[in-house]
Image (cartoon, grey):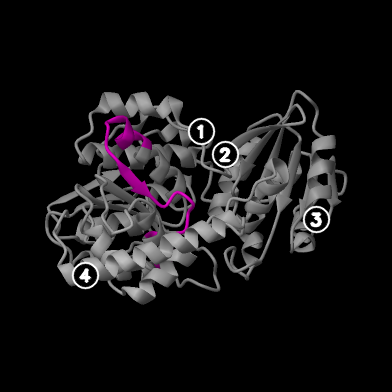
Amino acid sequence: MGNKIQLIDRFRLGFAVSVAKGVTFMVRSLRLGAASVLPGSIARRIEPRLLQLLSQQVKQGAILIAGTNGKTTTSLLLREILERKGYRVSHNSTGANLENGLMTALMDNASLTGSLDVDYAILEVDENILPRVLAPIQPKLILCLNLFRDQLDRYGEVDTISKRWGRAIATLPPQTIVVANADDPTICHLGQQLSQQRVSFFGLTEPEHYLEAIPHAVDSIYCPKCGQALDYEGVYLSHMGEYSCSNCGFSRSQPSLNSSEWPQILVGLYNKYNTLAAATAAQELGVDAATIRDTIPNFQAAFGRAEELEINGKKVRILLSKNPVGTNETIRVVTQSTDKTTLLVLNDRVQDGEDVSWIWDVDTEKLVQRGGTLVVSGDRAYDMALRLRYSDPNPHTNFNLIVEEDLRDAINTALARTPNNETLHILPTYTAMLSVREVLTGRKIR
């Protein structure tokens, strides 16, 4: 953190950053995208140690945020908390969370000579590459949010990923701060096994929010220590809740914060987890509770994450839905409202995951049984339509299914069927969310 760079390294770094900034200028000037990945890819070829050389200039250190769900929202909240305290923060806010995206984000804040004058770097990191970037970045704090099945064609089982995380984190200095999700058995066990001096936990302490039963889309209900089925007092979402193992004694660690005493950002119980994760990390960095509490009520959603827009005088809420657990939670938000029109957009592009079989692990029955109008679109619109049709055991259910292959037509149809006093909920996968926002706002995100 804040180390001096040798003259030859400084020259190569400066040249790499200058070239990258030139690429960024061209891409953005020609409106080809946000240039969130390509500059890093090019600069990395000039200076392979780019990530290390930039990271070591961050004065207070880098903060890595990893997990399947919640990275963007959590990192944005933590950024706002730190900026409220007057810190200068670099952040990969576009969500480009692979190595080239991390480098591009750091270079955005660097001078043409490669000098980086920031206090913190908040970097959301893809769960699969976390072990690869720990050594060059040497983070001050690692925030482990959760692990769920996601993009089945890219990732292995959650236990495999957590073991890789554990082995990599174990090589870091003992003063590295780790903040882990106590309610996720796999993440909790990982935190308990680490030798770092400062390992803290976050989680919910609100049993009134327990689900009636463990959902179908559940990943880790077995003890990560001995393999026995865990005994759950209650679950909040998927496999996350209050648990213990009667065979080996493994149990949930005590969270640092009492969640019932804290407000939350946005809608949905999953955003309470994001709030607590950011708040716990901020406290570990020395931020006072008053500043954290003052930031939460003023938080604005990141694009597509419970983002609310007004289109033609009607309210629209976009709820990113990219895997079974996340989609079950966005469906819970929809079914807890009185709004009766929902648009689901399913794509199968590389960033979404090309295997869409995960939709059969989603509890779409709850969405269908409440009735109303469901409009379906996207590259795999008919796959989603079939899943919804199979979710209706009662042919007399008051549920209207409309398939519109063209996204713009689908949005117009859904808006037309949304009364002025209701909100249109849109549940898109990642690339679908980008397309939805472009149609609604006329602007590309990336």
Q: Give the Cα separation between the discs numbered 4 and 2.
A: 43 Å
Front: mark 3 or 2: 2
Disc 3 + disc 2, Cβ < 8 Å: no
- In terms of depth relative to the viewer, which is nearer, 115 or 70? 115
Label 3 sits on residue: 389
Image point (59%, 67%), residue name: 353
Image point (80%, 41%), residue name: 414
Mark closest to the chain's N terminus, 3 or 1? 1
Mark closest to the chain's N terminus, 3 or 2? 2
Residue 30 horizontal side relative to residue 234, left or right: right
Mark 1, secondary structure of its residue: loop
Front: mark 3 or 1: 1
Locate residue 223, reporting x and y percent. 34, 61
User: In the rendered image of this protein, does residue 108 appear above or below residue 171?
Assistant: above
Label 4 sits on residue: 9
Q: Residues within 10 Å of mark 2 (few under 14, many from 20)?
A: many
- Magenta residues, as a range? 80-102
Mark 3, secondary structure of its residue: helix
The amino acid sitting under disc 3 is: Arg
